[in-house]
Amino acid sequence: MSHLQLDQAQIDRARDSARRIARQVFDEMSQYTTTTVERATLRLLGIDGIDENYVPLPNVVVDHLQAQNILQHGAAPIVVAAMQEQNMSAQEVAEAVSKGTLTLTLPKDADAARKATEAQAALMCEHIANQRTFRAKQIETMGEAPTPWLYLIVATGNIYEDVVQARAAAEQGADIVAVIRSTGQSLLDYVPYGATTEGFGGTYATQENFKLMRAALDEVGEKLGRYIRLTNYCSGLCMPEIAAMGAIERLDMMLNDSMYGIIFRDINMKRTFIDQFFSRMVNAYAGIIINTGEDNYLTTADAYEAAHTVLASQLINEQFAYLSGLQPDQMGLGHAFEIHPELENGFLWEMAHAQLVRQVFPDAALKYMPPTKHMTGNIFKGQVQDTLFNIVSTVTNQNIHLLGMMTEAIHTPFIQDRFLAIQNAKYVFGTMKDLHSEIEFKSGGLIETRAQEVLAETESILADIEKMGLSAAIGKGTFAEISRTPTGGKGLAGVISKAPDYYNPFPHLMLNTAAA
């Protein structure tokens, strides 16, 4: 593949700034846990289900521990100690707490409780490792599509209808099926339970829905002779819990950004930074590819003027990901084809941005988003815009290719719209299969010069962020031209200072033990 002439020392300096930025946030946040981290931990210990009022049992137990003023010590050893004392499973402990027949207290023997807790947690780690191994064997046996993988969305609100559409999408050529969540689920501080049929603008993310869709895609994958990946949304106030559910049910990708919830959902900074670490750790251990959300910046900021903020955020997201144990091939760093179509040479600038990202992250599983902001409802022009997007994606070797819809800005795409989008992408990918290895970027030309400019701006802004701190940078509206404050946003009440003896077994097991 042809390469742009970029200053590697400049890339290294930018990456070093991003590393120090992420590390500072990580060190500051490591003294806290959150209610949803503790609920995710309970889910990983085997607690699920709801009470008679439809409140999820992980919520019931965590609320109980808060009421007892002992959550700051960590939910896991308290519950496991109760399991041993009462001769109950984790689920039975949760049900007893829900019924009011059991009051949880701190373990009488803290060391023994820790050892028992780690042993209990290791059982779930083994299950998740087995799911990762199964995925790898399925891919080895059935094979998978070459990149760019075609990523297609289903979002009926009814999981059973989603299954029908997902099967059809896979048969038409989709390599990844993403189930959009119901509108507003990211702001719910609990995870709905069971199979759901009444979502609005999407389908609720629940463990049962994950299980149903996973089974359907496995079945159609066997029929087609290739592995079909499943994606959902690991973001919002329940980010760690959804990561846990996805790991248990063998999802393959999760939208999981370190700052998206802060910027676009007004979720508290502390809450998000703490939750993203734990959720990404689970995703890393499960072999799940995360998708980050920098593409969204270009829906509120100008795609040409703000290009450097995308690269800066990607570098920060990369460093947060490393801290959670993710490897480059699990980093679906996001960017988008969003320059105004009337801008002269806009296609060249899109090519420059995409190639720059490819070279800065040569091993990452890049996620490339189609034009949305400047789609007008003119389906003929929209088809042309999507075609140009498809060209850039294949020429610059993107990995995860979200299909552009000619009916963007009109309605939720019909299945026939998705079929036409797949046909468009497959045509471009086929007819231009080896174009990337046949062309060279002109030395000192417009594309190369533009990429060098964006890289220089990225290095500069990261140096500024390092000086002021990431929280202050977000407060200034550095990303997406949206400002948030450290004490603002939803979910701050769920942030808890850890006691000196706080214990959670999963960071030790998942960060220090490689999954098979």
Image: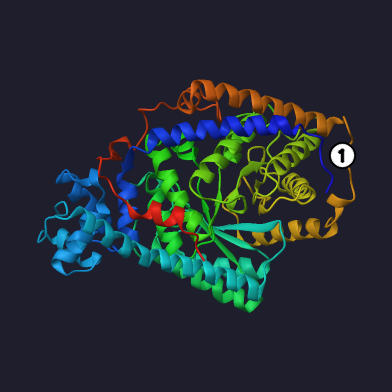
Q: Is residue 178 left or right of residue 26?
A: right
Three-letter code, disc 1 = Phe
**Residue at (64%, 30%) from the top-left corner?**
14
Dot 1: what SS?
Answer: loop
In this rendering, is residue 401 above or below 69?
Answer: below
Can residue 55 be seen here? The reply is no
**Residue at (72%, 44%) from the top-left corner?**
358
Is 344 in front, or is 480? 480
Image spot of residue 264 (x, y percent):
48, 36
Q: Which residue is mark 1?
A: 441
Determine the image quadrant of residue 93.
bottom left
Q: Is residue 182 left or right of residue 433?
A: left
Q: Which residue ends up furthest to the front in the rendered image?
A: 111
Image spot of residue 354 (x, y percent):
73, 41
Is 280 in front, or is 234? 280
In this rendering, is residue 131 above or below 354?
Answer: below
Q: Is residue 420 left or right of residue 274?
A: right
Q: Which residue ends up furthest to the bottom in the rendered image?
A: 223
Image spot of residue 207 (x, y percent):
39, 63
